[in-house]
Amino acid sequence: VTGSDVGGWRGRAGAGGPVAFARDEGRPGGQAGEPRVCAEDPAGGVLPSVGTVLAYEAPAGDGIRVDAGVETGTRVPTTYDPLLVKVVAHGADRMQALRRLDQALAGCTLLGVGTNVAFLRRLLADEDVRRGALDTGLIGRRGNALTRHPLPEHVLVAAALADLAAEQTAAASSVFDAGGGWRLGESAETPVRLGAGDRIVEVRVQGPIAAAHARVDGHDPRAARADLDGAVLSLELDGHRRTYRVAFDGGSIWIGHAGRAWTLHREQRVTTDHAT
């Protein structure tokens, strides 16, 4: 809000150096906000999260400054403060600053460690927060509205298609190894079982991922077209196109979209036994 490096002034003053600035320097203008991305689970009592950062894409945008202490490959323990990233947005007024913050967080990807990014976006959308009517009881009053949301069906379809795409890329010189439900005359459904929290969800996929139909837990099949390019999955589901960041960690699939991240666990599928 000052347009000046106030942190630099503090450093020079702490070192015993002079702090000189013009008379009109340091006058505040506009408003700024700073949410902090932490390795914690808001839905689980804000307990700390641990793990290795599998993918990190920093928040960005007009009026945005980012101070990050992580990168892809960073191991996040519980030994230290859970703070990972500070996101600062400046705007001409409060509403512009909040919009810029939300846009920056929507573009943030951090997979491998549970974070509070989705919680921060919901908090920024709260009417009392937007009006500046804050108090220490606000989060308690909102309850699960800020911390708990159902797993979207499009994420389950994205995870299943990403799993199949990665499997197809990895192997298969034989149709019997490809895992695509091959049969003469038509393609069968390939089941992908995903552990989502305390339940198991089955996504059945028919056809190649570029022109498939997907059924989630026995629901009606939905037209799905997907393409996995490295760690980026593009999915068109029922005419709606979304882009996801994907990371695999052993038996887990991490899916990131619009600042949110989900962890799904792959249930082992039956594979061909080459010894028989």
Image (tube, rainbow, N blue to C red):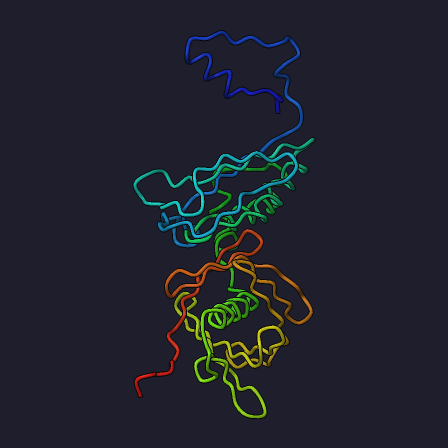
Residue sitting at x 51%, y 15%: 9
Residue sitting at x 41%, y 70%: 266
Residue sitting at x 53%, y 76%: 216
Q: Position of residue 34 (x, y in %)?
A: 54, 35
Q: Nearer the viewer, residue 140 or 27?
A: 27
Picture quadrant where residue 207 is located: bottom right
Q: Nearer the viewer, residue 54 or 222?
A: 54
Q: Is residue 164 above or below residue 73?
A: below
Q: Position of residue 65 (x, y in %)?
A: 57, 34
Residue sitting at x 61%, y 73%: 210
- Locate the N terminus by quadrant: top right
Q: Nearer the viewer, residue 207 or 274?
A: 274
158 vs 14, left or right, is: right
Q: Position of residue 189 (x, y in %)?
A: 52, 84
Q: Extreme front residue here?
A: 173
- Label count reads 0
Q: Is residue 105 above or below residue 194?
A: above
- Locate the C terminus by quadrant: bottom left
Q: Is residue 245 above or below residue 68?
A: below
264 vs 211, left or right, is: left
133 vs 137, left or right, is: right
Q: Position of residue 147 (x, y in %)?
A: 48, 53
Q: Extreme bottom residue here?
A: 184
